[in-house]
């Protein structure tokens, strides 16, 4: 396990100081570690961090931050309730008054907010640390994390008038992918967008690709904000740059979308599957 003691837990979640026995939290920390492995790290990187010889305490601490907050959120409903022969009862110490339902719910909500912030910190750390890229970026987990032009909640905050947690971002992520497929790929080609996403995964984005990528992320952000006209203007700027630098964008110029739009007699009609109002 990555989080193994009550002291490690209470350093992250001070309100858990009243829990004397780590065994009371262990089922929830184990579940949280499984969540972290499945949703963020992938099994290979998780196994490395969980190993006895692993020495990167900074990365372990980031993982513990996620685990503790997820585990506490999961555990809170069970910590002060016991199942008796006559039903459920609230556990109450002699000198303590049970917290109100509202306080407990606020605490749980804050745990999820902190967990999501720590996940963003963890992803940022891993993106910046090449030593972990083979294990992390080679996993199916990372493939799911990275199959969108905009990959994190913090990135969406940069490109849209949006403020939310990672949980909120994950709810919005299908829309980001759908808008990419329906509004960006028909113009810039599916092959080139897939290439850009793969280059992001591999940290292999060229200066020319980076310029286009930033513009496309800005366009996506405007779409999320409902600013379609601005999104089209930004996309048109990206397309002009590509057209002026053909040698740098071989995948786009070899695509079926480019060929269709440059076929003699082609008309950009609204009922065309490759219609775009930026032309």
Image (cartoon, rainbow, N blue to C red):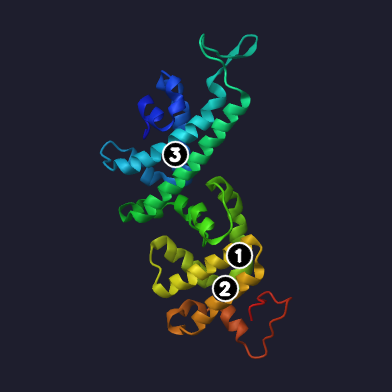
Residue on which disc 2 sits: 234
Specify which label sits upstream in the sequence, 1 or 3.
Answer: 3
Q: Kindly state the secondary structure of the residue where label 3 is placed.
A: helix
Q: CA distance from mark 3 to mark 2?
A: 37 Å
Question: Image quadrant of residue 12?
Answer: top left
Q: Which residue sits at x=32%, y=43%?
A: 58
Tell me the number on the disc at residue 222. Answer: 1
Quadrant in which residue 262 is drawn: bottom right
Furthest-bottom residue in this view: 264
Q: Does residue 57 appear to the left or right of 229 in the view shown?
A: left
The earlier-in-sequence mark between 3 and 2 is 3
Verify CB contact (< 8 Å) between mark 1 and mark 3: no
Res. 48 visible in picture = no
Q: Residues within 10 Å of mark 2 (few under 14, many from 20)?
A: many
Of residues 245 and 94, the one drawn nearer to the viewer in this rendering: 94
Task: Determine the residue positioned at 58% across, 48% down.
Answer: 168
Q: Residue at x 45, y 41 (%)?
A: 36
Compared with residue 232, is residue 19 higher up or lower down, i.e. above or below? Answer: above
| Crowd rating for badge 1 (residues with CA inside 10 Å; few <14, some 14–19, many 20+) | many
Whether residue 38 appears in this view of the structure is yes
Mark 1, secondary structure of its residue: helix
Element under label 2? helix
- Give the Cα separation between the discs numbered 1 and 2: 9 Å
Answer whether labels 1 and 2 touch (C-beta < 8 Å).
yes
Q: Foreground: 37 or 279?
A: 279
Q: Earlier in the sequence, mark 1 or mark 2?
A: 1
Q: Nearer the viewer, mark 1 or mark 3?
A: 1
Q: Which residue is mark 3?
A: 66
Is 12 located above or below residue 120 in the figure?
A: above
């Amino acid at each position: 396990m990555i989080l193994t003691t009550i002291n490690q837990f209470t350093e992250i979640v001070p309100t858990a100081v009243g829990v004397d026995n780590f065994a009371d939290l262990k089922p929830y920390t184990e579940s949280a570690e499984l969540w972290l492995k499945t949703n963020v790290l992938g099994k290979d990187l998780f196994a490395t961090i969980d190993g006895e010889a692993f020495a990167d305490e900074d990365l372990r601490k980031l993982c513990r931050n996620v685990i503790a907050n997820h585990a506490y959120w999961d555990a809170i409903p069970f910590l002060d309730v016991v199942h008796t022969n006559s039903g459920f009862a609230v556990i109450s110490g002699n000198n303590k008054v049970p917290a109100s339902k509202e306080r407990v719910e606020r605490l749980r909500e804050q745990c999820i907010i902190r967990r999501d912030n720590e996940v963003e910190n963890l992803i940022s750390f891993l993106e910046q640390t090449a030593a972990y890229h083979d294990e992390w970026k080679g996993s199916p987990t990372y493939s799911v994390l990275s199959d969108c032009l905009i990959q994190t909640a913090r990135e969406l905050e940069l490109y849209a008038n949006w403020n939310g947690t990672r949980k909120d971002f994950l709810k919005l992520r299908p829309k980001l992918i759908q808008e990419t497929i329906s509004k960006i790929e028909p113009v810039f080609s599916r092959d080139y967008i897939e290439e850009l996403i793969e280059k992001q995964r591999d940290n292999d984005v060229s200066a020319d690709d980076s310029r286009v990528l930033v513009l496309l992320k800005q366009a996506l952000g405007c779409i999320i904000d409902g600013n379609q006209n601005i999104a089209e203007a930004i996309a048109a700027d990206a397309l002009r740059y590509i057209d002026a630098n053909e040698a740098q964008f071989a995948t786009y110029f070899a695509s079926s979308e480019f060929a269709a739009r440059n076929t003699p007699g082609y008309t950009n009609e609204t009922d065309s599957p490759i219609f775009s109002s930026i032309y």
